[in-house]
Image: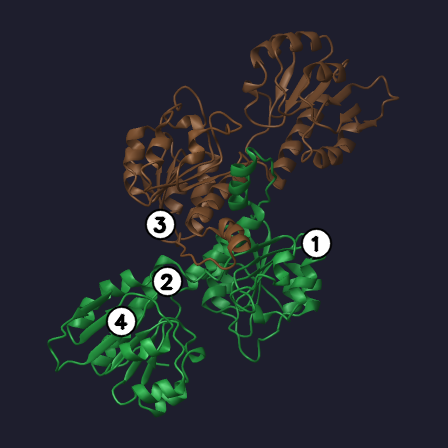
Chain colours: A green, B brown
Amino acid sequence: MIIERNMEHTDLPLVVIPACFPSMAPYLERGLDVIATKARVRMHTDMTLDLDEIMARLENANVAMTTGIHFNNAMLDALAPTLRCLTFGGTGVANFVDVNHAHDLDIMVCNAVHYGDNAVAEHTIALLFEITHKAGRLDVRTRAQGWPGSDITEIGGMTMGIVGFGGIGHRVAELAHGLGMKLIVWARHPDTETLDRLGVERADSIDDVFAKADVVSPHLALNDATRGIITARHLDMLHPGAIFLNTARAELVEQGALERRLNNGDIFAGLDVFDPEPLPDDAPLRDCPNTVLTPHVAWRSDKALAGIVDQNIRSVVAFLDGESYNIV
Amino acid sequence: MIIERNMEHTDLPLVVIPACFPSMAPYLERGLDVIATKARVRMHTDMTLDLDEIMARLENANVAMTTGIHFNNAMLDALAPTLRCLTFGGTGVANFVDVNHAHDLDIMVCNAVHYGDNAVAEHTIALLFEITHKAGRLDVRTRAQGWPGSDITEIGGMTMGIVGFGGIGHRVAELAHGLGMKLIVWARHPDTETLDRLGVERADSIDDVFAKADVVSPHLALNDATRGIITARHLDMLHPGAIFLNTARAELVEQGALERRLNNGDIFAGLDVFDPEPLPDDAPLRDCPNTVLTPHVAWRSDKALAGIVDQNIRSVVAFLDGESYNIV
């Protein structure tokens, strides 16, 4: 479906949404009115990754609002005569657009930030609950087997170890604190005020976290300094019964190390991120014991989607007003 | 297996554990040393509900440590010549023993209390996470279907409505507060200090809770005053998308009312308790949409089991010392 506003006002700039994820569509549609006070708007409500189709839809656009579309430099060159602003529904736009090349072409690139901090932190805790209380898998077993007996494990009193203390790590600490967990945190630049408020033990090293915690969850951005920062040696320091969570990036962990540690059969893992994604059908991780695997959904909450769209629309409005918001 | 201590000291009183749940056995075994300083001890490590077998095992016992065994009055009469103390691994001993009849026979009855407050409160939150974040069911789908897309719903900012504010309701309120939920509570005798500390809105009525909350969870004991206290009319007040949780007792809800409300398809439910239990294979509830069902496991945590055994052992030691602990 195509939704258009103001198309008769050919003097106004043209904002095009060439494709969108179904779950974002309602939020975008609600936001169109704001943009339509300043521009023509054309929104395609379906999702496509067909690059020819996307380029056709973006013809003459001055602003492109996109999510999940990889733009190569040839595409940017072709759009450059009219395109002045490109928004991206996420944080890591650098994986989808060569930002320097866009800047050379005088195309402003805007992303969205921190929209998912609470969603990802909650999903981290959701994985912890599924490992300890097993509600979802007991639901499946209750339907299949009638009345399966099962013991559960309490979270309160466990020690949560957090590696990295940005927006998400910070929120995980708050949620874990609220559940009666003790906290140990390692970060290069810790926020001392929050550490003190939550009564957090500050770890001397990543080793320290893995040696002392019952649950370990990394919350670091992936870059050259953090790729593989969690090694097989760290995972070997986990005590039997410990839980490793990952809602950040699979590549933070040394390749193959988690599978090897899990195959000892004495630790648990709750994972929302994989390398590669989608997780292949024959990925060794699928055969490891004691795991809860979710398909990179931690960021996809109602509020996070609304937050992304809200920030992207603010960026477009700012651009149309000659100002700037969330420029990369 | 039978574990015995001190059996050669026939002058000492005899404590018998005639049967036990496998998950309680390790905690009981660890506690035997304390009792063995004052009594002979015989522990049967298997579970049986065969009453003849149980009576044979309890022959000449002065103290019986039991869980889940229904004693009728004829059994109590037969045990009365020697039995002076009976402990029960749970709170609701009145459903298993006629306490007045036991008292008439000079048998002291002891139970365990509040051991499961945090476990049940955590499981209530676990059901909420499974409804909103679906980690367990996404795990099953990821294994079956590869890489299923899914949106999730954030808990933070939702309003949790709690009906009843004893030990468990209190703890649910603390956990929900820690997750960034707003709170509305109805209770006959609310704990004003806690309500203030957690910034709780005090509801005028149960109606008020159902009308205002996004999530409603009853935490009342079941008795003549509370049976069916939640009616079809209350459930009709839930807004579309609302969530009903029950880790207390199914009989708090008017019979059939929850199934009818769920079949509208616009609310969700997370349930750990059913009427009857085990939940029959043909129970209509199994066919209702939007439910997460767990088989009455909320109390069965590691710490709760340890707490029950700890309290029961304290009761036995107190009895042996001529004192009392947790007498019903």
Tag of residue A313: 4
Please give the name of the residue rendered at 55% of the width and 69% of the height, measured from the top-left corner: A276
B270 left or right of A216? Answer: left
Tag of residue A265: 1
Label 3, label 4: how far apart the Cα atoms are = 25 Å
* Upstream in sequence: badge 2 or badge 4: 2
Q: Is residue A247 above or below residue B97?
A: below
Q: Which residue is mark 3?
A: B158
Q: Are marks 3 and 1 on the same chain?
A: no
Q: Amino acid at mark 4?
A: Ile
**Dot 3: chain letter:** B
Label 2, label 4: how far apart the Cα atoms are = 14 Å
Give the SS element for disc 1.
loop
* Upstream in sequence: badge 1 or badge 4: 1
* Residue A189 at x, y percent in the picture: 52, 74
Label 1, label 4: how far apart the Cα atoms are = 48 Å
**Dot 4: chain letter:** A
Q: Amino acid at mark 3?
A: Met
Q: Are marks 2 and 3 on the same chain?
A: no
B61 left or right of A22? Answer: right
* Residue A37 at x, y percent in the picture: 15, 72
Q: Are marks 2 and 4 on the same chain?
A: yes
Of discs 2 and 1, which sits in the foreground? 1
Quarter location, residue A164: bottom right
Residue furthest right as drawn: B8
Tell me whether circle 3 and circle 4 mark residues in contact (CB < 8 Å).
no
* Residue A299 at x, y percent in the picture: 43, 62
Give the SS element for disc 4.
helix
Q: Amino acid at mark 2?
A: Ala
**Dot 1: chain letter:** A
Label 2, label 3: how far apart the Cα atoms are = 15 Å
A3 left or right of B37? Answer: left
